[in-house]
Image (cartoon, rainbow, N blue to C red):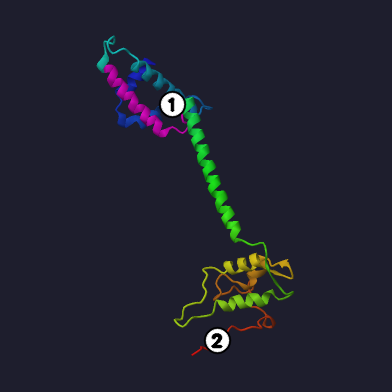
């Protein structure tokens, strides 16, 4: 053990990663079922014990006070490195762990409270009621939604715009029923191609002519 600490005190602090990895590799090679966590905690315990022994020395009794202080600073540097790679909170006392866990738990509870508020706000804006469409008429609504997307204002900009056609399908699915029955997304996909300007043949179809019974036309301007 004395030889081990002599090597620690001889190495430059810039080489802590190299020193740690070399000894970790040696340990894992000699212990096929070994775990880095065990190695780390054993190393941490050795450093902590040695540091505590040096710190608790009576400076007036010690004949090597200057060297002791140098070793203390060196070990502190090594513990700072170990802390930076500590994935197991090995440097925490039992009391510190309790405080950290309580703090984390409080933080999670606060997040849950905020999420609960957001959910309540979202639900307050939603409605369980749906607009019912007459039997065998949902495609008439689909046709109107498709025509809405073609409407242009005087400046040639779209009246309504959505980046994807999925929003129209979700709107119908969420807020409409046909004969009080769900209008499924899969059923709607046939009439809302991803690119309405280039519908995939065989997968998408136009609304049948007998369902295209309404046109949206500009109203006469009032003087």
Q: Which mark is residue 150?
A: none
Residue at disc 2, secondary structure: loop
Q: Residue furthest front?
A: 223
Q: Position of residue 176 (x, y in %)?
A: 67, 68
Q: Position of residue 118 (x, y in %)?
A: 55, 53
Q: Residue furthest bottom?
A: 223
State which tag comes first along the sequence, 1 or 2. Answer: 1
Q: Residue at x 36, y 30 (%)?
A: 80
Mark 2 residue crowding within 10 angstroms, few (<14) / some (14–19) / many (20+): few
Taking the image as shown, residue 206 lies to the left or right of residue 221, namely right
Determine which residue is flagged by label 2.
219
Taking the image as shown, residue 135 lies to the left or right of residue 18, namely right
Determine which residue is flagged by label 1.
26
Look at the image and tell me in which quarter the N terminus lies. Answer: top left
Q: Nearer the viewer, mark 1 or mark 2?
A: 2
For marks 1 and 2, give the CA distance.
85 Å
Q: Nearer the viewer, residue 159 or 17?
A: 159
Q: Position of residue 147 (x, y in %)?
A: 58, 79
Residue at disc 1, secondary structure: helix
In terms of image quadrants, where is residue 91? top left
Q: Confirm whether the magenta stretch covers residue 77.
A: yes
Q: Residue at x 27, y 21 (%)?
A: 70
What is the magenta segment's predominant secondary structure?
helix
């Amino acid at each position: 053990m004395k030889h081990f600490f002599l090597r620690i005190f001889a190495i430059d602090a810039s080489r802590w990663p190299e020193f740690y990895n070399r000894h970790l590799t040696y340990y894992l090679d000699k212990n096929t079922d070994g775990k880095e966590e065990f190695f780390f905690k054993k190393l941490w315990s050795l450093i902590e014990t040695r540091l505590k022994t040096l710190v608790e020395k009576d400076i007036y009794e010690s004949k090597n006070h200057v060297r002791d202080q140098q070793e203390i600073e060196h070990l502190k540097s090594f513990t700072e490195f170990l802390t930076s790679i500590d994935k197991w909170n090995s440097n925490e006392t039992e009391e510190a762990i309790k405080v950290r866990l309580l703090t984390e738990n409080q933080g999670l509870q606060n997040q849950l409270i905020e999420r609960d508020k957001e959910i309540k706000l979202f639900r307050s804006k939603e409605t369980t009621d749906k607009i019912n469409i007459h039997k065998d008429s949902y495609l008439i609504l689909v046709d109107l939604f498709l025509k809405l997307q073609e409407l242009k204002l005087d400046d040639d900009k779209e009246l309504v715009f959505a980046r994807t056609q999925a929003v129209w399908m979700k709107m119908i699915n969420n807020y409409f029923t046909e004969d009080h029955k769900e209008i499924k997304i899969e059923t709607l996909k046939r009439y809302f191609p991803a690119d309405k300007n280039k519908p995939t043949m065989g997968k998408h179809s136009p609304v049948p002519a007998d369902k295209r019974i309404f046109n949206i036309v500009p109203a006469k301007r009032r003087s």
